[in-house]
Image: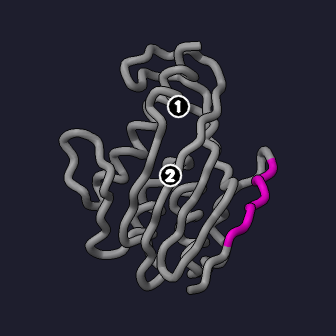
Amino acid sequence: MSVILDQAPATPAGQATMPSSAPLRSTPRAVATRVHANAMPSGAEAVLRRQLAPGFRNHDVLPGCAGGPDALVATMHWFHDAFDEQHVEVLHALTEGDMVALHVAFSALHSGFFLGVAPSHRRFTVREMHLVRVADGLEAEHWVMRDQVWWEHELRR
């Protein structure tokens, strides 16, 4: 069994996290980071869709969504309707074979309705855990754990 645990450095403020000329590395960690720390917070639907494998399955979906690529895109749009200035910092990444666990800090400005909470126009940070399976250099499956109680606490404070 080969396990890699590391802490990822934060992206400096104001630095682009996914320049179009950047070479794409295909390690499982790089794939998971491209999707969840770069494409999702940027709102770049076309970029996100290019990172998903044929038959991609999102296991944690919004009500009314199937589990394919459209489910992850819907989540991205849901977040963009509610939050401006999104930033995802990878705090830890654990890789075993084709599986990657990401522990991330999601920061944003609460600018729209989310979980029934009206916009507070405050900045906040919450932590999430993502589990990603990578196949042929693309994200094939995704699971996420978000602490909804903490989200609501942060948005209502």
Q: In the rendered structure, which amino acid carries the disc numbered 2? A: Met
| Quadrant of the image containing the C terminus | top right
Instruction: Specify whether 104 is left or right of 6.
Output: left
Residue for point 63% across, 19% down: 122
Looking at the picture, the colour scheme in use is one colour
* Mark 1 or 2, nearer chain start: 2
In the figure, 31 relative to 64: above or below? below
Give the magenta-colored segment's residue range. Answer: 5-12
Single out the residue that lies furthest toward the front.
Answer: 1
Residue under label 1: 83
Q: Residue at x 38, y 44 (%)?
A: 75
Q: Is residue 69 left or right of residue 38?
A: left
Main secondary structure found in the magenta portion = loop
Is residue 72 magenta-colored?
Answer: no
Q: Looking at the picture, how far across and down is residue 81, in whole percent? A: 43, 32
Q: Nearer the viewer, residue 90 or 54?
A: 90
The residue sitting at 68% across, 70% down in the picture is 5
SS for tag 1? strand
Q: Quadrant of residue 106?
A: top right
Contact flag, marks 1 and 2 (Cβ < 8 Å)? no
Which residue position is annotated with label 2?
Answer: 40
Dot 2: within a 10 Å radius of its alpha carbon, few (fewer than 14), some, or many (20 or more) residues? many
Q: Residue 13, relative to residue 96: is it above or below?
A: above
Q: Quadrant of the N terminus?
A: bottom right
| Residue 53 falls in image quadrant | bottom left
Q: Secondary structure at mark 2?
A: helix
Residue kind at label 1, given as amino acid type: Phe
Q: Position of residue 115 (x, y in %)?
A: 38, 25
